[in-house]
Image (cartoon, helix red, strand yellow):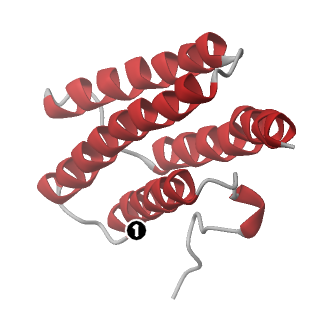
Amino acid sequence: MEAKLFAWKQAYSVGKPAIDAQHRQLIELIASLHVGMTEGKGRDVLAAILGKLIKYTLDHFTAEEAVMRTAGYPGLEQHRGLHTSLAATVTKLSKDFEAGRVSVTVETAMFLKQWLNDHILGADHAFAVWDAARRS
């Protein structure tokens, strides 16, 4: 059996159990998309996984931004910009996939993995550091 493309590791924790749980779910969905591709799953299966991933991502962004807004995070607008950019990219990908203009490839899963990895370890951790300092 091949190793997972993406797996949760403690370094991803931002110290907010609800956000960490959502990040775990996003990681699992990206891993599922990758497994579906490598196992040659049909277009319908990949479309369902991709759709679920996009919906969950958008829901997560809304929840994460609400936590930041409640905390008074000064970097919220910049963070929201990162979310908006990815949301536009994955929405276009989904529409192109549904229209048969593109296929979901390993590169797609790698892009999503890299984006989430970098986002959690960068922007999300910046919020976590700020929030911890604010609380102490």
102 or 78: nearer the viewer: 78
x and y percent of residue 31 in the render? Answer: 46, 63
Residue 18: give x, y in percent of width and height: 49, 55
Q: Secondary structure at mark 1?
A: helix
Residue drawn at the location 44% of the way across and 33% of the way down: 61
Left or right: 126 as drawn, with respect to 112: right
Q: Residue at x 26, y 54 (%)?
A: 49
Residue visible at 32% across and 65% down in the picture: 36
Q: Quadrant of residue 120?
A: top right
Q: Residue 75: x, y in percent?
A: 70, 17
User: Quadrant of the rendered structure where residue 30 is?
Assistant: bottom left
Task: Name the spot of residue 80 as percent of width and height, x first.
Answer: 54, 18
Instruction: Looking at the picture, tell me which residue is in the foreground, 86 or 70.
Output: 70
Residue at 41%, 24% (x, y): give it.
87
Instruction: Count residues near mark 1 (Cα–Cα under 10 Å), then give few for <14, some for 14-19, many for 20+.
Output: some
Q: Amino acid at mark 1?
A: Val
Number of callouts in the render? 1
Residue denoted by label 1: 35
Which quadrant is home to the C terminus?
top right
- Side of 36 relative to 85 (left or right): left
In the displayed structure, does residue 133 sit left or right of residue 60?
right
